[in-house]
Amino acid sequence: MKSNGKIAIITGATGGIGFQVAKRLGNDGYTVILNGIDDEAGAERVKELSSEGIKAEYYGFDVTDEDAVTDNIEKIGKKYGKIDVLVNNAGGLGGRSRFEDMTTEFYRSVMALNLDSTFFASRAAIPFLKKGENASIINYTSIAGWNAGGPGAGIYGTSKAGVHAITRALAKDLAEYGIRVNAVSPGTIDTPFHAQIKSTKPEVFESWKNNILLGRLGKPEDVASVISFLVSDDASFMTAETIQVGGGQGLGI
């Protein structure tokens, strides 16, 4: 088994970007703890990682459930005696709704998925991150946090703007303990997140490349490699930063 003795928790890690982050950190030598809500997929992902010599575990819980997040992260922290990395990967669009028609339930569900989850997991992990080595938290914001998102995605953009702010706030709060907090802001990454539009409107999906300076969609590995750097000793003087991983999205010709 590959091992550097460090522990990394990745939420929402049973597929897409999260799984590639788990695989990359596992190959970097971390023991990776995958979280998700699909227990069958979780078991498969652990099996896949284990077959590659990566030490991996799966914990099934909903990141919007405060008690479940706290209980599970405490279990992980107590089992290993520390946490070195927390990657708050879980999140998503949650659907689309214009504000005039938006229900309070929808508003709260999107905020919970993206912002509450980041707060719950970070809060629970802090006591164990204090015991970690070059410990850090990685959050996910989005270009929508700056441009407020497309039609019907306004509350998603609002939640991601909150993640940008809480990243900097956590960095201020935790600097005295040597815990770094940074964020990545993925552009359009070719994952199952876009599966519906890719299958129903492939021409629209392909046209997205036109707004990306490098002329292609991102791959999950593109995000994973940046996170690998951010949690490494090479980034030990970086905190409160948000790294755009979008190929120059918004600057395309």
Image (cartoon, rainbow, N blue to C red):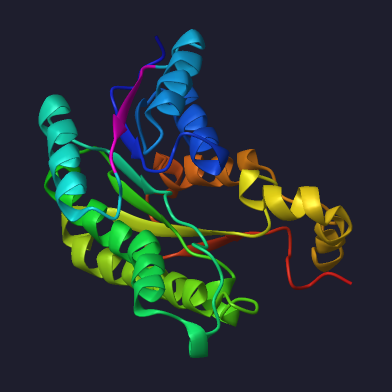
Picture quarter with the N terminus: top left
Q: Is residue 124 left or right of residue 200?
A: left
Q: Which residues are magenta?
A: 55-61
Residue 178 can be seen in this image: yes
Q: Which of the pair 80/4 is nearer the observer? A: 80
Q: Is residue 98 left or right of residue 164?
A: right
The residue under the point 58% across, 46% down is 223
Picture quarter with the C terminus: bottom right
**Residue extending farthest bottom:** 100
Residue 131 can be seen in this image: no
Q: Is residue 140 magenta?
A: no
The residue under the point 53% across, 65% down is 95
Note whether 153 is above or below 11 in the view shown: below
Q: Is residue 60 magenta?
A: yes
The residue under the point 40% across, 20% down is 43
Note whether 251 is above or below 174 in the view shown: below
Q: Position of residue 68 (x, y in %)?
A: 18, 45
Q: Position of residue 152 (x, y in %)?
A: 59, 77
Q: Position of residue 84 (x, y in %)?
A: 27, 38
Q: Is residue 224 left or right of residue 56?
A: right
Q: Which of the pair 94/251 is nearer the observer? A: 94
The residue under the point 47% across, 18% down is 49
> What secondary structure predominates along the stretch shown in magenta?
strand
